[in-house]
């Protein structure tokens, strides 16, 4: 299996070019599972502190995209969005 429960290979590095970060976000969305969603959400929350506002928006957009793939986790994912909106 190409995609496992480990999404860490798709975590973005601060010095990755924007196009690489975008691809890695897409891969994180696709590799999200019930087993790794907490780790992915933690990583996405870290991305919201980045300087690049487009990347921040893409990281936030990734959360509902994961929710569409994993409907059973919608509540947890939208709680994260709510927390981000309040901070």
Image (cartoon, rainbow, N blue to C red):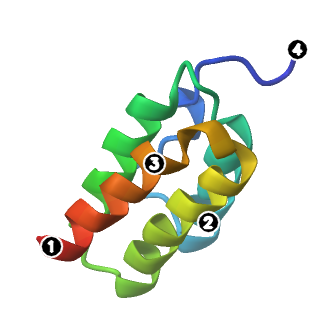
| Mark 3 to mark 4 CA distance (whole Å) | 28 Å
The image shows residue 72 at horizontal and vertical percentages of 62, 37
* Tag 2 near tag 4, CB within 8 Å: no
Q: Residue 75 — which label?
A: 3
Q: Residue 1 — which label?
A: 4
| Mark 1 to mark 2 CA distance (whole Å) | 25 Å
Specify the farthest residue to the right: 1
**Left or right: 4 in relation to 24:** right
| Mark 4 to mark 1 CA distance (whole Å) | 38 Å
Task: Give the mark nearer the N terminus: 3 vs 1.
Answer: 3
- Label 3 secondary element: helix
- Label 1 secondary element: helix
Badge 4 crowding class, 10 Å Cα cut-off, few under 14, some 14 to 19, many 20 or more, is: few
Look at 72% across and 17% down and name the residue there: 4
For marks 3 and 4, give the one nearer the viewer: 3
Q: Which residue is mark 1?
A: 86
Q: Residue 22 — which label?
A: 2
Look at 44% across and 69% down and name the residue there: 60
For marks 4 and 1, give the one nearer the viewer: 1
Q: Does residue 81 lie above or below 45 as drawn? A: below
| Mark 2 to mark 3 CA distance (whole Å) | 25 Å
- Label 2 secondary element: helix
Task: Give the mark nearer the N terminus: 2 vs 4.
Answer: 4
Task: Give the mark nearer the N terminus: 3 vs 4.
Answer: 4
Task: Give the mark nearer the N terminus: 1 vs 2.
Answer: 2
The image shows residue 33 at horizontal and vertical percentages of 64, 28
Q: Choose top left, top right, bottom left or bottom right for residue 57.
A: bottom left
| Mark 3 to mark 1 CA distance (whole Å) | 16 Å
For marks 2 and 3, give the one nearer the viewer: 3
Q: Which quarter of the figure is the N terminus placed in?
A: top right
For marks 1 and 2, give the one nearer the viewer: 1
For marks 3 and 1, give the one nearer the viewer: 3
């Amino acid at each position: 299996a190409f995609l496992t429960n480990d999404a860490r290979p798709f975590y973005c590095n601060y010095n990755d070019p924007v196009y690489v970060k975008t691809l890695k976000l897409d891969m994180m969305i696709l590799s999200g599972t019930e087993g790794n969603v907490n780790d992915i959400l933690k990583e996405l929350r870290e991305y919201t502190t980045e300087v690049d506002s487009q990347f921040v928006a893409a990281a936030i957009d990734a959360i509902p995209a994961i929710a569409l793939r994993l409907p059973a986790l919608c509540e947890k994912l939208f709680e994260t969005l709510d927390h981000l909106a309040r901070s």
